[in-house]
Amino acid sequence: MEQAIIKAYEFIDEHLRDEFSLDELARFVGYSSYHFARKFKEVTGKTVMEYVREKRIFAAADEIKAGANICDTAMKYGFDTHAGFTKAFSSIYGCTPVQCAQHAQKSFVKGKIDMEKSKIVIRPVCKDDVQDLWENVYSAMTPRQITEEKILPAIERLSRREGIELVAQVDGRVVMSLPMVKPFWIPLGVLFDNNYVLTNGVEDEIMEKLLEEMKNQCRMLNVSTLISPQVEGSESAKAFMHFGFTEAWKSGGWVYLAMSI
């Protein structure tokens, strides 16, 4: 059955712009519609047509980000109306097609930050941060992915005292984040998903503030040591050593930097 699922993936990818039914897809892979649909959902967690619609929306999004006309793209991928396409797009992508196009065209210049005049707040991430995170931190992800894969898990970890994601809010806008996970019962906090590179500018000062508040939060979470896994010799490894981390051990091309709290 695994080969049938692979064949189905290939068929779907090759026919995203074509109309086809569940029965046609099941016949193509050599199974009854009932058994194929049941197995497909077991493997993917989605119905066949939910999966197809999601693939079509992501393919359409790629074209829209490249400058394609939204209405033409909607028709190309089988949506008869702009309203229907917008509704499906928003449900899957987390924003409208227009917002997606605008996001792709932005240069994401954060603007000049005056550390003396700007109001800087370091706090845990919240659901309302999705737009700022999309623009300034996780710009390669979709708003829905940011919500489901970053924000909600971070909020859940904090509620369980298993980690925290801090954000730096400057004059009302989130411009940087720092996630930490506390694995199991051991008093270690792991800074993951962070490839910060020194800028010799205000960003370095903001990262210092994030790290200072992270240490405060770690004390409340009974974390005594922060660990930052980095690619050995990378600029991000150099950055965290600049902020006071020291080399703890190396393995498989990675260096594990540590800071006592």
Image: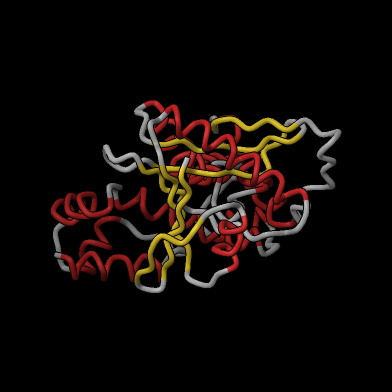
Q: Residue at x 54, y 39 (%)?
A: 87
Q: Is residue 61 visible?
A: no
In this picture, residue 50 sits left or right of residue 81: left
Image quarter of residue 95: top right
In this picture, residue 199 sits left or right of residue 85: right
Q: Residue at x 55, y 33 (%)?
A: 125
Q: Residue at x 72, y 50 (%)?
A: 203
Residue 218 vertical position relative to residue 204 in the rendered view, above or below: above
Q: Quadrant of the N terminus?
A: bottom left
| 55 and 243: which is toward the camera | 243
Q: Position of residue 25 (x, y in %)?
A: 27, 62
Residue 245 vertical position relative to residue 211 in the rendered view, above or below: below
| 132 and 176: which is toward the camera | 176
All told, the count of numbered labels is 0
| 109 and 158: which is toward the camera | 158
In this picture, residue 246 sits left or right of residue 249: right
Q: Position of residue 155 (x, y in %)?
A: 44, 31
